[in-house]
Amino acid sequence: MRTFGLLVALLLIPTFAAADDGPSVLAKMDESMSRAVDQYFEYEVVNEEKGRDPKVMELDVWIKGPMRLTEFQAPGDMKGTKALVRAHDQMYIYLPAYNKVRRVASSMTSGGFMGTTFSNDDISTVLYGPVYEGSLQSETDTAWVLVLTPKADAKTAYGKLVMTVSKKYIQPDTIEYFNRKDQHVKTETRSGYTCEGDVCNAESMKMVDHTRGDASTELVRRTWKVNTGVGDDEFSVRNLQN
């Protein structure tokens, strides 16, 4: 009887689902960001810096897995310029004026991407789990706050990222970027999320560079297509010159 009573007592103890932790949230976010087989975007890009007129650019972006291909459509002097990300540490630039492809050295990850406040490192980070370790800093009803630190073998421009991840979309709302001296150097805001089925994406991505007097670059989505069937060969270095 005593054994039976103990079993009943154990069954009456409430059970709780395992709480989210940093690695699980980071894995969920990467899964949410890569649910589509491929995605295609057309963006209007607006660069703003104090004392200068805004500069407007237009570009097309294809994403498939860890790969990203960007092609500039405007202004005229940048038309046809392409940037290919094969992996976080494999980025190539095609300059039509020279009809040459060059690989971007890993030592240049912190450099600005084509005059924007996004760095080469920002553009080449398609998924975060392969590059960063995640720890859960805090949690609310609507968001998780993660602290991401580079993995031991990862070459990144940052010492850490503080990322607020929406529980609704399981994607970043804000990302604060810190350098190796733990100085807050940039802030990215992603807003206006919409979804195609279970694939969601932000309409606006704005990067503010606090080291340049809060100069900013905003990518405003004009067109978005999911699962277009683009082939892997479109993301080849050879294809850049076509």
Image (cartoon, rainbow, N blue to C red):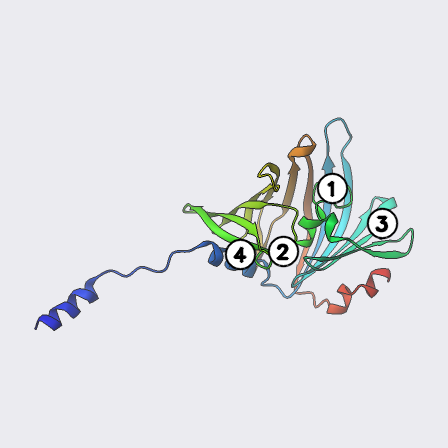
Q: Position of residue 195 (x, y in %)?
A: 57, 55
The kind of secondary structure element at disc 2 is loop
Q: Which residue is mark 3?
A: 79
Residue found 83% across the figure and 52% down from its top: 81
- Residue type indicated by callout 1: Thr
Give the label on residue 154, or none: 2
- Residue type indicated by callout 2: Ala
**Mark 4 and mark 3: span between their CA atoms?**
33 Å
Q: Which numbered mark, 3 or 1, is in the foreground of this view? A: 1
Is 83 drawn above or below residue 74 in the view shown? below
Q: Quadrant of residue 174?
A: top right
Residue found 73% across the figure and 55% down from its top: 61
User: Do the residues under discs 4 and 1 have CB atoms within 8 angstroms?
Assistant: no
Quadrant into which the N terminus falls: bottom left
Q: Quadrant of residue 50?
A: top right
User: Do the residues under discs 3 and 1 have CB atoms within 8 angstroms?
Assistant: no
**Mark 4 and mark 2: span between their CA atoms?**
19 Å
Q: Position of residue 83 (x, y in %)?
A: 77, 54
Q: Which numbered mark, 2 or 1, is in the foreground of this view? A: 2
